Amino acid sequence: MEESARTVLDFSSDVVISLHSWQRRTPLPEELFERAALDPAEFWLRVAHQVIEWIEPPTQSLQWNPPSSGSLPPWVAWFADGKLNVAQNCIDRHVRTWRRNKAAIIWEGEPGDTRVLTYYDLYREVQRCANMLRSLGVSKGDRVTIYLPLIPEAAIAMLACARIGAVHSVVFGGFSAEALRDRINDSQSTVLITADGGWRRGAIVPLKRNADEALRQCPSVRHVVVVQRGVMESDNVPMQEGRDHWWHQLMTHSDVTCPCVPLSSEDPLFILYTSGTTGKPKGQLHTTGGYLTGVTATTQWVFDIADEDVYWCTADVGWITGHSYVVYGPLANGATVVMYEGAPDYPDRDRWWALVEKYGVTIFYTAPTAIRTMMRWGEEYVQRHDVSSLRLLGSVGEPINPEAWMWYFTHVGGRRCPIVDTWWQTETGAIVIAPIPGRTALKPGSATFPLPGYRAVVLDEAGSPVPAGERGYLVLEQPWPSMSRTIWGDPERYVQTYWARYPGKYLTSDAATCDQDGYFWLLGRTDDVLNVAGHRISTMELESVLVEHPAVAEAAVIGRSDAIKGQVPVAFVTVRESHRNELPEIGEELKQYVTERIGAVARPAEVHVVVELPKTRSGKIMRRLLRDIAEGRVLGDTTTLADPAVVEQLKEKYRGEE
Ligand code: PRX
């Protein structure tokens, strides 16, 4: 197996941290684990009955025809005869109890403006929004694209779609007009919900302007709803007559009663786009009953959320973490969720800790890249605040190096809070490998064990389990309720990407190793997908954008290890003869070009203009070599190179720039 570009974790599998005095607030009976091991499908059906309010409870658990039997999708179904509504589970069932006036969302904008929505507020707003969507012609199965800052309207819009069976596609507000356009066109959304803009580090993110640019090439969109976030005067927001409407105006005229539509368990809930190994993002389709079961149960097991908790996951709703662990999982559990719109260092580097103190956050979930950034800034910023309300910490998105783990544990958690390192993916919908706090002894840097109901293994190329301590492919051996059901519009790609390599088993595309105690250690991606600050970026997607630039003849993008972001993209390009005179500026221009075409998350850290890319005799670009060069490692075997002089030239170039 090819060594991934990530730094292999420098772990010691002997360090074990057990916090004996730490008590769960939500008890987990031992019987749960026994049942899960005995019969996972039966176990999940029981969990589905326990954690969900069904309109018609399912009698069926899993229906599963693995692809080896020759069938094409739909070939997996969970709880197929059950009927439910996700909004009912996240709102209505709480409104019937004392939670009616409990804070559901405590929101703070970057400038410091605040809003608190109780479950009853959410109940009213979501119904109004659902009626608003109906008045714009949205009905069951129609797609609605949501392109918003991290404001409560994002959750309201998602839940309103769920209420009427419309399928939402949330596009991260940091994505460019083109990225938005492609996602709208792929999903064929009829309505777009956006805002005048949002705040990021004191600057305006011009969402409506991006949306207008995108919409020039989105014939499916009939209506645009614009939330007035108030970043600019409404007179400065151009509104297209007949197409564009202000959210607040439509909401005022919408009825406040909109009953939940009973949906089948396998009805679609949302599409979320994620990078894969081609230039085209994949629309992962998640369905209703299985997804909600997965996120609701794992929120209980892993975050131990109880009514007394104030829970804050720092992810944006534009990513799967925001879907599953900002909106659906916590709200289905009746939790109080903190949402913060802006940057962690605005106005100063202590903003997050100021928020933890102000709202008395008890459970805090973030990404390793953020922890490493805070570590670099120094612990003085945490120490400015009383963060003793914290009782549990979480990590997601990339492997957490033991050093960052220990810093988080010591300086944020005061050595009293367990850290749940949660491994999962957009495709898995919910957490798969993570500690169960209060039960699992922790090893810094390890996501520990698969949760109940999952079977994870580390396999070699041939499909045999690798011995303890050896590196292999992480594979999930059986379906689980919150798995993505297909790639929107491309079922064949879904089967090929995930289920064909080891027929009937799910290929995660992550490398992993299991130590002698059975702990899982995640070692990064095995495909051409980079993990930049916890975000998935496809090298192919970057390359196809770069070659669309008129100056670029060929492009190769690789990931280089980075102390803060985990990985950063590095591009090697050859330039067309006709553009030779632009060479001095081309690097900056291409970085800007990628930012405009995809978004700042994909901006290359370096662009190297080379005379030729190193290729094998059959013409394949030698990425491994480029990685070695970018990371300054000793060169590997170059005998397959068509023109070895190219390597020397590349090495020279790299040295020259150091
Ligand atoms: O490589 C793994 C990494 O993030 C990938 C999934 O990215 P995405 O679909 O954007 O979802 C991110 C949030 C769940 C995985 O294939 N990854 C995620 N969590 C971890 C991780 N790698 C190591 N440890 C983790 N805890």
Image (cartoon, rainbow, N blue to C red):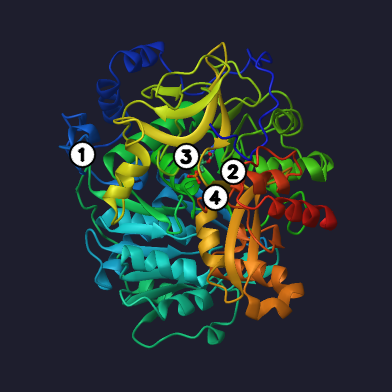
User: In the image, which disc is placed on residue 75?
Assistant: 1
Disc 3 marks which residue? 335
Q: CA distance from mark 1 to mark 4?
A: 42 Å
Q: Amino acid at mark 2?
A: Thr
Question: Is label 2 or label 3 in front?
Answer: 2
Disc 2 marks which residue? 640
Is tag 2's residue or tag 3's residue first in the polypeptide sequence? 3
Q: CA distance from mark 2 to mark 3?
A: 57 Å
Q: Secondary structure at mark 3?
A: loop
Crowding at mark 4 (Cα within 10 Å: few <14, some 14-19, many 20+): few
Instruction: Indicate the quadrant where residue 35 lies.
Output: top left
Count the marks: how many? 4
Residue 533 or 584: which is nearer the viewer? 584
Q: Amino acid at mark 3?
A: Ala
Q: Amino acid at mark 4?
A: Arg
Expressed as whole percent of the image width and height from the top left, the position of residue 26 reads 47, 23
Answer above or below: position of 549 versus 264.
Answer: below
Q: Is mark 3 within 8 Å of ligand 1?
A: no
Labelled pair 1, 4 in contact (Cβ < 8 Å): no
Is 601 positioned to the left or the right of 73 in the image?
A: right
Is 82 positioned to the left or the right of 499 in the image?
A: left
Is tag 4's residue or tag 2's residue first in the polypeptide sequence? 4
